[in-house]
Amino acid sequence: MIDNYGYDFVGWIGFLGKLNDMMLDVIGKIPVDNEELLIDAAQDIKKLESTIKDKSTHQDNWIVSKVVEGPRNEGVVNVELKPLDISSYCTACWLIRSQFYIFCFSNLFYYMQVF
């Protein structure tokens, strides 16, 4: 069960840190002959660590929204962490058929805006 930190951004960052610690414990228990699972777990841990670092460094740029609890007191089943300013995550801009597209990427979100 995931505890409900409500709209407390620092609480959710703490949750992500605990999740990262748990994943580091689990990766040590994966059999070495299961190379594909080890690679996937290592990539997920790397993404999570990057996400935690980014969100911790730029706390004032993030908000918590859409905290959804399960129907039968199951704790939180969904939460969104959204950036207020996406400009630092934009990686490509180009003109296609007179439409200006901006693609923005992050570990936890994908955003596309058409102007």
Image (cartoon, helix red, strand yellow):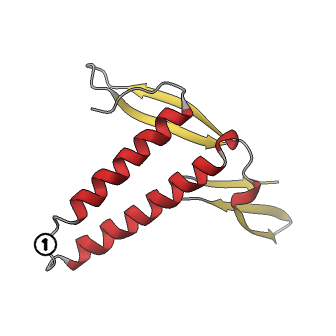
Mark 1, Cα crowd under 10 Å, few <14 / some 14-19 / many 20+, is few
Front-most of 87 and 58? Answer: 58
Left or right, 89 with reference to 15: right
For the point 46% across and 59% down, which residue is it?
Answer: 49
Whether residue 20 sits left or right of residue 54 in the image: it is left
* Drawn side of residue 43 relative to residue 103, left or right: left
Q: What element carries label 1?
A: loop
x and y, in percent, of residue 112 in the image: 68, 55
> The C terminus lies in which quarter of the figure?
bottom right
* Residue 38 placement (x, y as % from top left): 26, 72
Labels in figure, total: 1
> How far across and down, in percent of the image, does residue 108 sit?
52, 53
- In the displayed structure, would residue 107 be above or below residue 75? below
Residue at the image point whose x is 30% and y is 21% from the top: 71
Q: Residue at coordinates 51% horizontally, 52% vertically from top-left?
A: 52
**Against 77, is 23 above or below?**
below
Pinpoint residue 106: horizontal percent, then vertical percent: 58, 59
* In front of the other: 29 or 101: 29
Residue reaching furthest right?
A: 98
Q: What residue is disc 1 on?
A: 31
Q: Quadrant of the N terminus?
A: top left
Circle 1: residue type? Pro
- Quarter of the image for residue 39 reads bottom left
Task: Decide: is 69 above or below 27.
Answer: above
